[in-house]
Image (cartoon, rainbow, N blue to C red):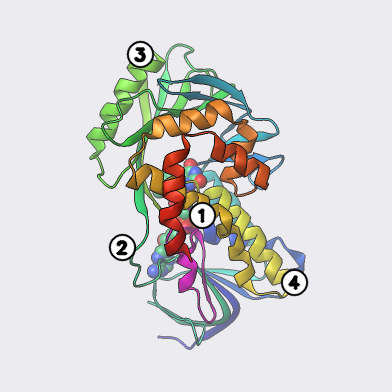
Amino acid sequence: MSTEQKYDIIIVGAGAAGLSLASRIAETPELNDKRILLLDRELKSGNDRTWCFWEHGKGNYDDVLTQSWHNVYFHSKYVSRRLGLQPYAYKMLRSNDFYNQTQSIVKASSNVDFVIDSVDEIDSQKGRVVGKNSVYLADIIFSSKFPDGLDFSNHLYTDQHFGGWFVEFEDDVFDQEAATFMDFRIDQNDEHRFCYVLPINSKKALVEVAIFSNTHQNKDGYDNIIRKYIEDYISKSKYKIDEKEYGVIPMTNYPFWKHNNGKLYHIGTAGGAVKPSSGFAFRRIQQHTERIVNCLKTNTSIKNSYKVFRGRHLLYDSIMLHVLEEQKVAGDKVFSDLFEKTDVDVILRFLDGDTSWSGDLQIMKAPAKWPFIKGMAKVISPLK
Ligand SMILES: Cc1cc2nc3c(=O)[nH]c(=O)nc-3n(C[C@H](O)[C@H](O)[C@H](O)COP(=O)(O)OP(=O)(O)OC[C@H]3O[C@@H](n4cnc5c(N)ncnc54)[C@H](O)[C@@H]3O)c2cc1C
């Protein structure tokens, strides 16, 4: 093994979180004197995931979006609504475009080295990263590799598992001005199941089914739900499937930041970026990235950046998870109440952890109160 290589900052993992952080640092003139190492066991490429997220105004990835919408549909057996999102846009970014954009920023920078190496061990006190090919040292390490010893048993935990098809119809069947954010009209099967539709144009869309539960389907299971959904709610006319995607996102109130210590800070899913009650992570990764860059610029503690995942919004997330997963209150009813009684921009700000107390109150007042009061009583003690 070669001698130890010294950097100011090491970023382990060049996926959504690592590449977001490395490219933002590369674009920050105040940090040009920092020597950065970005490490991954592989060079990510291709469309291994499709990110959807909402954003207010212009964002870092606007030039490479596949599509964006200013309207969304919400459907359930209780309510059907088409909602304007202004001032937000709901955006679709395919991973290949994200990897290309961020990797080329990193490549063009003079202070970020991107090295392919698989990391076996991180010594948080010494700031030492042991890879298969070399050993690296730094004052600060950001890692999207999961910490050792994760134990979810004392915390709320459920998977969001999903399957999706990129479909292309011969006829115009989609309203390309509006994405379907959630459609609960499908058979719930004692779980929380919804489909969503992300139209690229009037003939092409990504149609997905997402399920909140710990019992995963095999690929045929997701495929059957999507096929039936298309037939029942989109069109019976002819279409072809261009691509498929499947995935799992952990939804938990586990305090990932407790694994930060010494020189080591976790980012992305491993750092707690997945919103516990919804599974959305991309937007939170961007919010966290901005906060980390700010801490680096102002030479303040990186610990401050984790406030974005904590505070009262984590309590609300935990209550929501409790209501859905422990009390098994029907998700289609909870979300229907929310979308029927609350302004959509308040819902999006709430999901961003950006509501004022009055916005929080609007959200809390919408669904039936008793399960939420019960949920609050249950989750307050483990969060202390
Ligand atoms: C199919 C799919 C679709 C999703 N869609 C959405 C969405 O629409 N909206 C949303 O908000 N969220 C979505 N998510 C959730 C979340 O945004 C993604 O999972 C996101 O990629 C998480 O970013 P990350 O950097 O934590 O992990 P990743 O993007 O998986 O990156 C982790 C990186 O670390 C590297 N790595 C791990 N261990 C080591 C090691 N030992 N040595 C070296 N390198 C290592 C891996 O190779 C990888 O490149 C989706 C997730 C999936 C799986």
Q: Which of marks 3 and 1 is in front?
A: 1
Quick one: SS at disc 3?
A: loop
Q: In which quarter of the image is the N terminus?
A: bottom left
Q: Find residue 193 and report its image quarter.
A: top left
Q: Find residue 207 and report its image quarter.
A: top left
Three-letter code for the amino acid on which mark 2 is drawn: Ser
Residue at disc 3, CB closer than 8 Å to ligand 1: no
Give the mark, 2 or 1, whose residue is nearer the N terminus: 2
Q: Name the residue under label 1.
A: 315
Quick one: SS at disc 1?
A: helix
Q: In this view, does 326 lie to the left or right of 87?
A: left
Q: Nearer the viewer, mark 4 or mark 3?
A: 4
Which numbered disc covers residue 238? 3
Give the mark, 4 or 1, whose residue is nearer the N terminus: 4
Q: Name the residue under label 2.
A: 153
Q: Nearer the viewer, mark 4 or mark 1?
A: 1
Give the mark, 4 or 3, whose residue is nearer the N terminus: 3
- From the top left corner, tell me how far across and down residue 45 is, in percent: 46, 51
Give the mark, 3 or 1, whose residue is nearer the N terminus: 3
Cα separation between marks 2 and 4: 38 Å
Three-letter code for the amino acid on which mark 3 is drawn: Lys
- From the top left corner, tell me how far across and down residue 326 is, in percent: 33, 47
Q: Name the residue under label 4.
A: 298
Q: Residue at x 42, y 13 (%)?
A: 170
Give the mark, 2 or 3, whose residue is nearer the N terminus: 2
- From the top left corner, tell me how far across and down residue 321 is, in percent: 41, 48
Q: In this view, does 372 lie to the left or right of 157?
A: right
Three-letter code for the amino acid on which mark 4 is drawn: Thr
Quick one: SS at disc 4?
A: helix
Three-letter code for the amino acid on which mark 1 is drawn: Leu
Cα separation between marks 2 and 1: 18 Å
